[in-house]
Amino acid sequence: MSRQYFGTDGIRGTVGQAPITPDFALRLGHAVGRVLRRTQPDATVLIGKDTRISGYMLESALESGFNSAGVDVVLLGPVPTPAVAYLTRAQRAELGVVISASHNPYPDNGIKFFSARGTKLPDDWEREVEAVLAEVPQWVSADALGRARRLDDAAGRYIEFCKSTFANDLTLRGLKIVVDAAHGAAYQIAPKVFHELGADVLAIGCAPDGLNINDAVGATHPEALVRAVAEHGADYGIALDGDADRLQTVDASGRLFNGDELLYVLAIDRLARDASLRGAGAPRPPALAGVVGTLMTNMAVEQALRARGFDFVRAKVGDRYVLEELVQRGWILGGEGSGHLLALDKHTTGDGLISALQVLQACAMQGRTLAQLLEGVALCPQVLINVRLQAGQDWRHYTRLTDATRAVEAELGASGRVLIRASGTEPLLRVMVEAVDADQAQRGAEPLPAPPTPGTLVRVDLGP
């Protein structure tokens, strides 16, 4: 059964339009509560949110929905998405709920869930929730209603968790770091994490007003971070997105490093540290046998990882699918170019703050800069075409696009590739052409036609 409401990362849309309305949020909380109580009669859920003004409305509606199904609620306030994953596990709750639209602008919002283990939930669980949504609500009696309370020190607990993932014998003392929290969920937490580890912190994007999340700052607008690093003569810049689960990094020269490059840095750092512990020539542990990327991962990073002896597997786009591959294979490292990075020996989900600490730790332990760690890894140019789709439009059977794609693939051969996929979070068709040569990638994208729709065609060049 296909899913009506859930996409690749929960339920997302424009506030005030179905399904991001208070009445649906109440029904959703009630349905999820009923699903939980099938196996956990005394279930407790944690609810965190980012800084969007609509978060208050959706939080109240979800709280009522859960309580009406007999489920207790613990309110965390504004905290990063990965903080909810951690606190759900640490508090032994049955479920974690995040109210956020991640990197989207403030008119959007979304709702996503974490299991008791702090991991994304499978498609089958989402289908079960949707089945209950279609049923008539079953309100519990007054004596069986759930209760609600606040966890006042949620932010402090998560700060300590982040710091615990950084080597005890290392410090950030002597480093000047610009931290950009995208006016989002980590606006108070992120500067404190780096400051308490010794860094001189300059904060930007840390003044939310409910309407400015991801507005010209953060991981989706790294030009603000590049400017700030140059202006203040900083050693590093760290940019998070609105819910702080993705990362972009800038070095002192102003060079921007995306998630693909940072994933390579984490992999070779783990390999070097493991070799030093086990001795030269010792076989690497199974957890470091391979790395998981996505269909969008840059070819150059795949080739570089294979050259260092790693297996490499591409998952569907979305960190939940990267996680599924990692768990299935027993590996620990994976991620996306957007900056969702997974290090399962540190956290159960992608975490922008912890990923940043792991990158800085790699530089310190290896005694090299980010640029030096990435010597010889030159990203292949990518051209991305975003095509806005109409609801229910069947682009898979648009023969002009199919025929043109085959022709471009034949021309590129082994030196490039074409990827076409529907976005899981927006009504967009994403067409990507990648090649070792920028002109070749651009030429390959030119003949690819858009499906017949009144929507907008946007071309974006993605590096190198």
Image: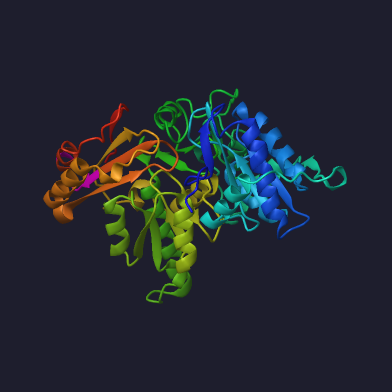
Indicate yes or no whether the magenta region holds residue 312. no
Q: Is residue 166 visible?
A: no
Q: Which residues are magenta?
A: 433-439
Query: Residue at 45% across / 40% down in the picture?
Result: 425
Residue 419's x, y, as percent? 27, 48
Query: Residue at 86% across / 42% down in the picture?
Result: 142
Considering every residue shown, the one lying at the far front of the view is 136
Q: Is residue 59 above or below residue 298?
A: above
When asked about the image quadrant of residue 301, the answer is bottom left
Q: Is residue 381 above or below residue 225?
A: below
Residue 106's x, y, as percent? 53, 27
Residue 373's x, y, as percent? 35, 52
204 or 365, nearer to the observer: 204
Indicate yes or no whether the magenta region holds residue 435. yes
Q: Is residue 380 visible?
A: yes
- Left/right of residue 321 with respect to residue 160 in the rendered view: left
- Left/right of residue 376 with respect to residue 350 in the rendered view: left
Residue 455's x, y, as percent? 32, 28
Query: Residue at 43% across / 74% down in the picture?
Result: 279
Considering every residue shown, the one lying at the far left of the view is 411
Query: Residue at 32% across / 40% down in the picture?
Result: 430
For the C terminus, which image quadrant? top left
